[in-house]
């Protein structure tokens, strides 16, 4: 199965409550995805030269203060630790940061990079993952979450969603693709590196590759309709957009509730039932192979 | 059962699903609806719950206030269930008799495999509405998605809006009446002329559903019966 949730807050004051509103949405999808959970949150955009990197330490014990001090020999950095994950922020060039991380802390896994995205994902019950990383305290304009029930690849933190590629782009998926290996074979000769054997990663890297080639998000998604085969609901986040699509057979569920304050998306209504004024919301099911894109 | 809230009317027993478990509500509906608390049952705060009011076998009225999850009023027998909200996947699936009325939209596979009774959906229905219909009647006030009436064996569907792709694919003896546009017909489904019996059927079902349309505006879709016998020479050209 898998569960998908997304929330875009339209009204500024409510953005401080993003995590509070989102956690019950995520936990509400526990039955659909009890083995792993993850969340990408889009926060205030950093200045042009800055980037933030969501780092995952897994079972390794990392002293984040040590890491920051060590990094300071390279340039200035600040760090925001959440258990065995941390968000590192710096104005050093991305290539420098990535090669430093690889050499100095090879046990660290880079979950996301960009000027607005913070990303957390791990194995365990959604409620446990939400508590582990303090999802309730997260603030931002929009967020994309996922609860996973593994069907086609292993249960590991790396196989949890959201997947990312490039900067400030993430994708979560409910369904199964039938041609992920074909996508990989097309992308790998172009220098695109895959970190897992997960089908969702293929969709994520394909769409980001199209955007890197010059497509806007909508055009990339249109190419995705042509190239990605299977039963899927995809929810994608960029620095300023939230996008939702279903396969041509609409095999995988999705429901949208929209008010003046927010757009909320979930696999099932029960994850939306607690939202403020949801009974007055415009509630609908997205149509098959239609593109739904909301801008912050 | 002491957690139940009795509404002021003696005719109505109200369950609040934010206070009472789904299991308690369904257990009541299965065992005691006629002997305990009056004829009408109201259910508040369904909040997307799955399997709400499934398997009722009693001539009672149930009113659900809010949106529900999967299989609402599935396997219904005798009861009249009204949903003041939207229904998730498979509402009234495998209904045997009675009536299920969805005031909002219904998600995919509404009325799947229903043997009898009447399903009314005021709004749109998703894909595969009436899939494998086995004798029930379905009236949709809005439009239906693709593959509706797929392999429908018996019963009638009245669609007041439009139909998506592959309407009535591999139909058996069910008949589909459509007021709006049909994006495409499925394999072996064909348009046929309406006769007096068809007009009377459509009028009767529209009346039962409380819809004002004119039966003269409907088209009839039924099986061409070419799929009934396997033809090894046909080369998949159905």
Image (cartoon, coloured by chain):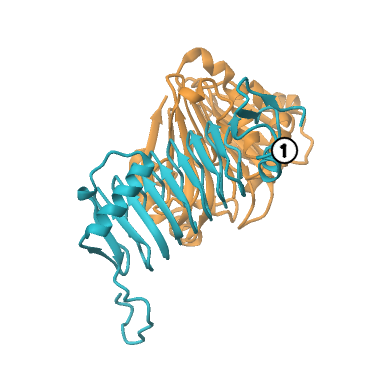
Residue at 54% from the left image edge and 48% from the top image edge: A174
Query: What colour denotes chain B?
Result: cyan
Crowding at dot 1, Cα within 10 Å, few <14 / some 14-19 / many 20+, comes out as some
Residue A215 seen anywhere in this rendered image of the structure: no
* Secondary structure found at label 1: helix
Relative image position of residue A262 (x, y in whole percent): 47, 23
- Image quadrant of residue A100? top right
- Quadrant location, the C terminus of chain A: top left
Please name the residue that numbered disc 1 is placed on.
Answer: B24
Q: Residue furthest bottom?
A: B233
Percent of width and height locating residue A16: 57, 16
Q: Which chain is orange?
A: A
Q: Position of residue A85 (x, y in %)?
A: 69, 32
Q: Residue at x 69, y 44 (%)?
A: A34
Front residue (pair A50, A270):
A270
Q: Is residue A253 above or below residue A261?
A: below
Regarding residue A277, the answer to whether it shows in the image is yes
Which is more toward the observer, A247 or B223? B223
Give the residue displayed 26% in from the left and 42% down from the top. B213
The residue depicted at 67 percent of the width and 43 percent of the height is A36
The vertical placement of B134 against B233, above or below, is: above
């Amino acid at each position: 199965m898998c569960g998908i949730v997304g929330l875009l807050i339209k009204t500024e004051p409510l953005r401080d409550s993003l995590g509070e509103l989102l956690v019950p949405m995520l936990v509400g999808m526990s039955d659909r995805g009890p083995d792993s959970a993850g969340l990408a949150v889009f926060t205030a955009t950093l200045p042009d030269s800055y980037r933030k990197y969501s780092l995952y330490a897994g079972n390794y014990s990392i002293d984040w203060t040590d890491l920051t001090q060590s990094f300071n020999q390279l340039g200035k950095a600040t760090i925001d630790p959440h258990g065995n994950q941390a968000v590192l922020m710096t104005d050093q060039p991305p290539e420098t940061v990535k090669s430093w991380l690889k050499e100095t802390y090879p046990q660290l896994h880079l979950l996301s990079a960009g000027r607005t995205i913070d990303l957390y994902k791990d194995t365990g019950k959604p409620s446990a993952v939400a508590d582990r990383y303090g999802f309730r305290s997260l603030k931002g304009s929009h967020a994309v979450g996922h609860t996973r029930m593994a069907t086609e690849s292993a249960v590991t933190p790396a196989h949890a969603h959201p997947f990312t590629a490039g900067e400030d782009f993430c994708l979560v998926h409910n369904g199964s693709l039938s041609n992920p290996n074909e996508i990989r074979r097309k992308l790998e000769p172009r220098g695109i590196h895959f970190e897992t054997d997960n089908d969702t990663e293929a969709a994520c890297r394909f769409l980001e590759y199209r955007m890197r080639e010059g497509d806007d998000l909508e055009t990339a998604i249109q190419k995705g309709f042509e190239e990605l085969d299977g039963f899927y609901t995809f929810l994608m986040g960029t620095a300023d957009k939230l996008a939702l699509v279903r396969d041509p057979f609409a095999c995988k569920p999705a429901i949208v509730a929209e008010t003046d304050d927010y757009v909320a998306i979930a696999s099932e209504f029960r994850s939306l039932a607690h939202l403020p004024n949801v009974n007055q919301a415009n509630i609908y099911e997205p149509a098959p192979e239609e593109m739904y894109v909301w801008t912050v | 059962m002491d957690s139940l809230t009795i509404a002021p009317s003696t005719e109505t027993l109200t369950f609040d699903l934010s206070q009472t478990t789904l299991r308690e509500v369904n257990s009541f509906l299965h065992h005691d609806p006629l002997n305990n608390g009056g004829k009408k049952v109201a259910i508040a705060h369904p909040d997307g719950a799955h399997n709400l009011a499934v398997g009722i076998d009693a001539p009672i009225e149930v009113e659900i206030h809010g949106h529900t999850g999967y299989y609402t009023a599935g396997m219904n027998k005798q009861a009249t269930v009204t949903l003041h909200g939207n229904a998730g996947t498979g509402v009234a699936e495998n209904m045997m008799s009675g009536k299920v009325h969805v005031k909002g939209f219904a998600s995919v596979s509404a009325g799947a495999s229903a043997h009898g009774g009447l399903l009314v959906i005021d709004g749109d229905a998703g894909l595969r509405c009436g899939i494998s219909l086995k004798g029930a009647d379905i009236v949709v006030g809005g439009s239906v998605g693709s593959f509706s009436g797929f392999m429908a064996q018996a019963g009638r569907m009245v669609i007041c809006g439009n139909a998506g792709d592959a309407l009535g694919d591999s139909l058996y003896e069910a008949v589909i009446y459509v007021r709006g546009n049909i994006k495409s017909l499925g394999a072996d489904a064909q348009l046929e002329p309406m006769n007096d019996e068809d007009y009377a059927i459509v009028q009767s079902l529209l009346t039962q559903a409380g819809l004002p349309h004119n039966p003269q505006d409907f088209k009839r879709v039924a099986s061409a019966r070419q799929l009934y016998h396997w033809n090894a020479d046909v080369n998949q050209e159905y």
